[in-house]
Amino acid sequence: MGVQCTPGAEDYLSEIIVPELSAAYPGVELLIHPSADMRQGFESFVKSGCALGMGACLGPDWDAVRAQAADAGLVCEFFGSERPQVLLSARNPLAAESALGPEQLARLKLVCYSSNPTPRYLSLFQGAAGRVPNKESVVRLVASSDCAGVFTPSGVRRELAEYRGRVRLLPMDVRDDAVQSVVHYLIHAPDGALRRTELCVLELVRRYPYAEA
């Protein structure tokens, strides 16, 4: 069976769900397909033939995403939400704090993605430190400099393990409207339309949300 997912969910499925599925149902293969931007519509999910999708959107977009799913005859379940946090080098003096407020953030330069050189929360920081093409480049630059990156905890789970002791992820103590939460969701056909194995996989995923609800 297939699962269509956003990049952050791919690691989660590979590390947690696939081993459990293999142990419980020998011979059942879970195929993970990269997702198109499901926030723009669910036609690609329907056409893919996948039984389950995992996606993410900004909190203010959640109601619209759920309505789009319903229009396509799909069920969209809230899976969890999390606020973006600041990634710092462990050598940065600010890494000793429990959270970073506006004054502390204003002392940091933010590493941005080339595809999004001016994120909404850039105004909280001193300015942009540079633009890099991907997440791995951001983490590598942060680990070796005084710059900062912004990620959701689930989005850098693998990198935090790889760079253990070299970087630290800290909450931002700022207004709720300054840094919007990310909502993670599951997308699938109504339970009654799913086959037994597909329902079992859905239950496995529901049991292990990878973001704090």
Image (cartoon, helix red, strand yellow):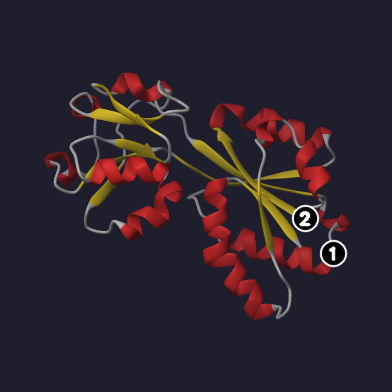
Q: Are marks 1 and 2 in contact (CB under 8 Å)?
A: yes
The amino acid on which the numbered mark 2 sits, given as a three-letter code, is Ala
| Res 209 visible | no
Q: Position of residue 117 (x, y in %)?
A: 41, 23
| Residue 39 % position (x, y) | 66, 32
Using the rendered view, name the quadrant where residue 101 is placed: top left
Relative placement, left or right, of 63 versus 110 is: right
Quadrant of the frame with the N terminus: bottom right
- Could you tell me which residue is drawn at 18 percent across and 26 percent down? 107
Q: Amino acid at mark 1?
A: Arg
Residue, x 24% and y 46% (percent of image)?
A: 143
Residue 132: name its quadrant. top left
Q: Secondary structure at mark 1?
A: loop
In the image, residue 60 sits, relative to residue 91, either above or below, namely above
Kindly identify which residue carries mark 1.
Answer: 195
For this orientation, the residue located farthest to the front is 133
- The local secondary structure at tag 2 comes to loop
Question: Residue 191 in the image: x percent, y percent?
Answer: 81, 56
In the rendered image, is residue 99 in sight?
Answer: yes
**Residue located beneath label 2 in the image:** 51
